[in-house]
Image (cartoon, grey):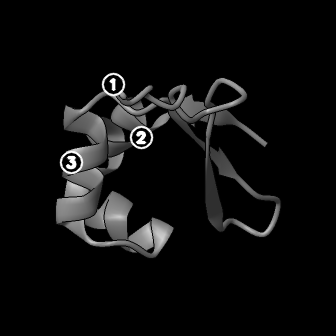
Amino acid sequence: MSRIHIKQFAQEKGQAEAALLLGMTQGGLSKAIRVGRDIYVTQQPDGSYTAEEVRPFPSQAPAKRSAA
């Protein structure tokens, strides 16, 4: 199994084919790359591809305090 960043995966396969292989739209793939999401694609032993995003935990920003 090889693991590469989604940007490199899209460069190698082309965005349309990469999106098809990941089961998503080309627009969704383009946006993920454009905003710099940290997503890695892994080729499975059966030849299919999966992707997972690496995010800090907790991933949500702290709640804002309201001025009372």
| Amino acid at circle 2 | Phe
Q: Nearer the viewer, residue 56 or 53?
A: 56
Q: Residue at x 56, y 31 (%)?
A: 4
The quarter of the rendered structure image containing the N terminus is: top right
| Amino acid at circle 3 | Lys
- Going from the N terminus, do you reach mark 2 or mark 3 first? 2
* Residue 61 pos. (x, y %): 50, 28
Residue indicated by mark 2: 9
Q: Residues within 10 Å of mark 1 (few under 14, many from 20)?
A: few
Q: Residue furthest front?
A: 68
The quarter of the rendered structure image containing the C terminus is: top left
- Residue 31 numbered tag: 3
Secondary structure state at the residue bearing disc 3: helix
Q: Residues within 10 Å of mark 2 (few under 14, many from 20)?
A: some
Q: Is residue 45 above or below residue 64?
A: below
Q: Residues within 10 Å of mark 3 (few under 14, many from 20)?
A: few
Q: Residue at x 31, y 44 (%)?
A: 32
> In which quadrant of the rendered view does residue 28 lie?
bottom left
Tell me the mark number nearer the camera, choosing from 1 and 3: 1
Residue indicated by mark 1: 67
